[in-house]
Image: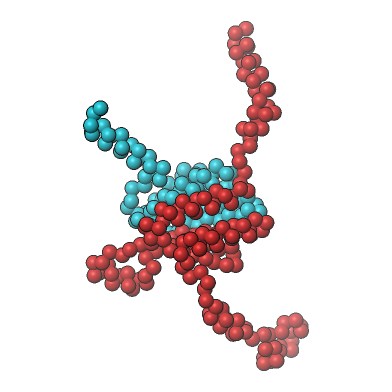
Amino acid sequence: MVYISSWDEFAERSIQLFRADPQSSRYVMKYRHCDGKLVLKVTDNRECLKFKTDQAQDARKMEKLNNIFFTLMARGPDVDISEVSGKEQSEAQPTKKGRGRKQ
Amino acid sequence: MVGSLAQPTHLPPYFKLRKVSSKSAREREREPSLFAFAMPDPFLNELTSMYERTTERGSVWVTLKRSSMKSKAKRNKMTSAGETIEYRCLVRATDGKKTISTVLSAKDHLRFQASYATILKAHMSALKKRERRDKKKAGDGQTKQEDLKKPPKKSSS
């Protein structure tokens, strides 16, 4: 199985994989409470990327990735990912304020 | 069922041939798929109970896929006719025995992902938290401080 050890690499490659073929790509999450293990899989039926963890911190990262995938799937693969936490939005706002009234 | 087929005489008795009971297959077809695309809220409720049921044993699989919910033929027709195809997010969950699913449109997904994140946070309690740092602080913290003190002393002497 193609297990990737780095979270960032997994996240980036899975997003690329989805963007390349949004019609056949899927994102699967398997959770076993009895073993305390979480496995994530992203595949387009040709290539498969997996990530296995038992760390709670990875669960938080996974939630962010979930949000990214939800956005990609619902709105389309060409949507700019604002990382949901609104990093790009927060960057955009101050500049707008700057262009606005100077107080 | 057993009597309807000629039993093989050359095989030991436990190799009894059984007609694959077509009844069960038919029953399976007739069974209404209970959660054929439920609304997001009942889906979330059922997902919560799924997580609760599998604490001692078993896994929960959640699959996310983009789908237009239309057949390929219709999709091709729509693209050739110039109509925009509306895509949705298909979410499936299973505990190995029961499968539930729901379909989200672009406006549903924001509300769904918030509730979904809450459910996951609440139930993924079996994952290990970073205890190493805490243990080091508690047990080895003193020795570490001593180690830190030593090198500067050595350098000064």
Observer-nearest of B146 and B119: B119
Observer-nearest of B152 and B83: B83
Q: Can residue B11 be seen in this view?
A: yes
Q: In which quarter of the image is the N terminus of chain B?
A: bottom right
- Return the x and y of residue B127 as percentages of the image width and height: 61, 46
What residue is shown at x 62% (from left), y 84% (from top)? B21
Q: Is A78 placed left or right of B155 in the picture?
A: left
- Picture quadrant of residue A20: bottom left
What residue is shown at x 33% (from left), y 63% (from top)? B86
- Return the x and y of residue A86 as percentages of the image width and height: 38, 42
Q: For the view shown, which residue lies furthest in the front direction?
A: A103
What residue is shown at x 64% (from left), y 20% (from top)? B145
Observer-nearest of B74 and A1: B74
Chain A on-screen colour: cyan
Q: For the view shown, which residue lies furthest in the right direction?
A: B13
Chain B on-screen colour: red
- Return the x and y of residue B10 as percentages of the image width and height: 74, 87
- How many numbered dots are placed on residues in this image? 0
- Return the x and y of residue B51 as percentages of the image width and height: 59, 57
Q: In which quarter of the image is the C terminus of chain B?
A: top right
Q: Is B74 placed left or right of B54 in the picture?
A: left
